[in-house]
Amino acid sequence: MAIFTRMQEFDYEQLVFCQDQASGLKAIICIHDTTLGPALGGVRMYPYASDEDALVDVLRLARGMTYKAAVSGLNLGGGKGVILGDPRAMKSETLFRTFGRFVESLNGRYITAEDVGTSLEDMTWINMETNYVTGTNPTKGGSGDPSPVTAKGVHIGIKACWKAQSGIDSLNGLTVAVQGLGHVGYYLCSYLHQEGARLIVTDVNEEAVRRVVNEFGAEAVSPDEIYGVSCDIFAPCALGAIINDKTIPQLKCAVVAGAANNQLAEARHGKVLMDKGIIYAPDYVINAGGLMNVYEELAGYNKERAFRRVESLFGTISSILETARKSKIPTSEAADFIAEERIRRIRQVQSVWVQPKISSAGR
Ligand code: NAD
């Protein structure tokens, strides 16, 4: 791969390749953009088929974090880490402490966190070597499980979408179809139930379904049926790529708004939803509660403050929907546009305030 060509394509700032034979660490840290602040993004551990697959993944994920932070109004840049290896076989204190030392060497340009394949325990090991880690143990001032805050953000995002679609503030009496009843899906069902919404739910885990049926009086359907149920809102909280050519014709909802990452199988599916009159809450915006939660840790974690911060998602999502409506573009494009505009504006301010460094070389 022509690495500099790839970096130039989306203006990546820095790639750090981390290798240590003693611990077996092979990792890549990618810092996409630090215009708004330090690059914060989790570290993923995954048995990539090749070094190139790992590089492609970390580049894609780091850039996604830049957009998520920018559109959410956070003073954070975008970055991500990947550790190459099987999380079930290769984890050790040495491995994560070594990764922590690499993070420390970046002096706060990159702040790490939990992601797919990494856990709270791994963050504790990283924390032995660096303070540039978030999502650490609540007993040590960390923010712990972000899911309740993420779910609250999704609940607020659904309300913003419904208000834009119908002019109505409340979800009372509406039918919401929830796909995936794990960490986020369960809390989302609880918030929706409290507000008087009727729930139709699915999960491949029968125990998770039983719990939501018993606690919130939800109606259960099979995983294949969820796309075609008659509902006001469809909330995907399980997998990516579930909005695709096969599922869109089945949808009988007015809004798609849920926590799952990468919901659109391809970018063009945002336009297909728009053409069907379905409002789509861009996934990386509506699920930003998790990032807001760890952001709060930087100033000393306070749970109430984290819950207050996610309330801003109502305004953020409303203005994305309004931009999309006025410009006749898919909401996913409107979100990207707003994120890029914020970064561009702050860059301009910086160019005014930052004194140019005059090199003495060659004088
Ligand atoms: P989770 O693993 O706890 O829950 C996912 C649930 O989906 C599980 O119960 C699983 O059994 C179910 N599932 C898997 N395949 C399914 C299928 N085919 N049909 C129906 N259900 C299926 O994950 P989570 O933490 O609740 O996150 C859910 C989604 O939200 C993920 O895409 C995640 O990346 C995203 N997200 C989560 C957070 C967070 O704070 N946890 C933050 C941002 C984004």
Image (cartoon, rainbow, N blue to C red):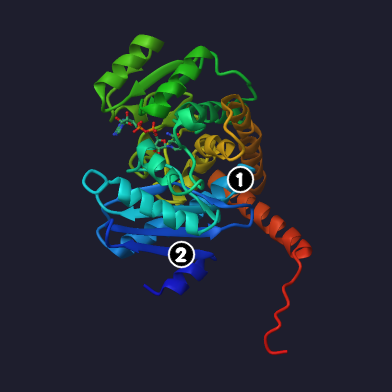
Where disc 1 sits, the SS reads helix
Q: Amino acid at mark 1?
A: Val
Task: Check the picture and name the quadrant holding the N terminus.
Answer: bottom left
Q: Residue 93 placed where, x, y %?
A: 31, 45
CB atoms of marks 1 and 2 within 8 Å? no
Numbered circle sitting on residue 71: 1
Where disc 2 sits, the SS reads strand
Residue drawn at x 34%, y 63% as measured from the top left: 19
Task: Check the picture and name the quadrant holding the C terminus.
Answer: bottom right
Numbered circle sitting on residue 136: none
Is 114 situated above or below 31?
above
In the image as oriented, which residue stretches furthest toward the bottom? 362
Circle 1 packing at 10 Å, graded few (<14), some (14-19), many (20+), is many
Q: Quadrant of residue 25?
A: bottom left
Q: Is residue 30 left or right of residue 342?
A: left
Q: Residue 306 placed where, x, y %?
A: 58, 30
Residue designated by label 2: 15
- For ligand 1, which image quadrant applies? top left
Q: Residue 99 placed where, x, y %?
A: 39, 53
Closer to the observer: label 1 or label 2? 2
Q: CA distance from mark 1 to mark 2?
A: 24 Å
Q: Is residue 263 left or right of residue 335?
A: left
Residue drawn at x 30%, y 21% as measured from the top left: 208
Label 1 lies in ligand 1 vicinity (Cβ under 8 Å): no
Q: Amino acid at mark 2?
A: Leu
Q: Can residue 335 be seen in this snapshot?
A: yes
Q: Can residue 330 be seen in this snapshot?
A: no
